Image (cartoon, rainbow, N blue to C red):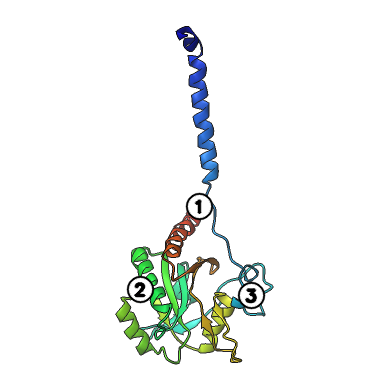
Amino acid sequence: MLSFFKNYRGFAIAFAIISIIIVSIIYNTLNVYQPLPVYQPTMVSTELVDSTIQYKKKYHKIADFSLINQNGKTITQNDYKDKIYVADFFFTTCQTICPIMTDHMVQIQQEIINDNDVMLLSHSVTPQIDTVAQLKRYAKQKGVNASKWNLVTGDKKQIYQLARKSYLAVKDNGDGDPFDMVHTENFMLIDKKRQIRGFYDGTDEKEIDRLLDDIIILKEEYQK
């Protein structure tokens, strides 16, 4: 019996080495870097997309914008140039999903506070109520860091068009007013090319974890 094992010792060692190599190859294959999708209007529920762009299958980007933040500063796409950012829609007097969403934005802010590549952007869907002064009070209450996170107000028509035609994230409330809206719980992850790379439920803690993981994946994309 001993002589049998001695005769096949070399074979056993070689087989073990080959097995380790094969397992390593399979593991690496299954863990290949997978880039995040680039979302187009055709990939999103039609109730969240303006009818004029529902057919678009490629080249979708966030449009230029000019809005006012909690400090009275004009915020444009240039403030987010070459940045990854998380966007959402809210209003300060909301008593349902907004407080949860804002608390989760605060959590994200804490995670990215020292990351110069990542910012946050929250759009008010009731700009007639959410004045600069109101946003300022809300920002102070929630601990918003203005260097990382802009709460913006401005022209309601522009905000609606951004919601429906750029971020693909807001429902029409169906009351006949083309500039009224019902915002969703969606958080959107936007890349440095102003493309949508992810949608997340801003009220779900697990979704926030997924969002933070996707930020890491997206950052890796720019390191390759």
Identify which residue is drawn at 49% across, 16% down.
10
Locate residue 195, reporting x and y percent.
Answer: 55, 68
Q: Residue furthest front?
A: 1
Locate residue 57, reporting x and y percent.
Answer: 67, 68
Q: Mark 1: few, some, or many residues within 10 Å (few <14, many ≥20)?
A: few
Q: Work out whether 207 lies above or below 1.
A: below
Sequence-first disc among 3 and 2: 3
Circles 3 and 2, Cβ within 8 Å, touching? The answer is no
Q: Work out whether 93 lies above or below 23.
A: below
Q: Mark 2: few, some, or many residues within 10 Å (few <14, many ≥20)?
A: few
Q: Secondary structure at mark 3?
A: helix
Residue type beneath disc 3: Thr
Q: Nearer the viewer, mark 1 or mark 3?
A: 3
Answer with left or right where residue 60 lies relative to residue 219: right
Q: Secondary structure at mark 1?
A: loop
Sequence-first disc among 1 and 2: 2
Residue type beneath disc 1: Lys
The residue that label 1 is drawn on is: 224
Q: Work out whether 40 lies above or below 64.
A: above
Give the spatial CA distance, label 1 vs label 2. Answer: 27 Å
Q: Which mark is residue 46?
A: 3
Sequence-first disc among 1 and 3: 3
Identify which residue is drawn at 51% across, 21% down.
14
Q: Which mark is residue 147?
A: 2
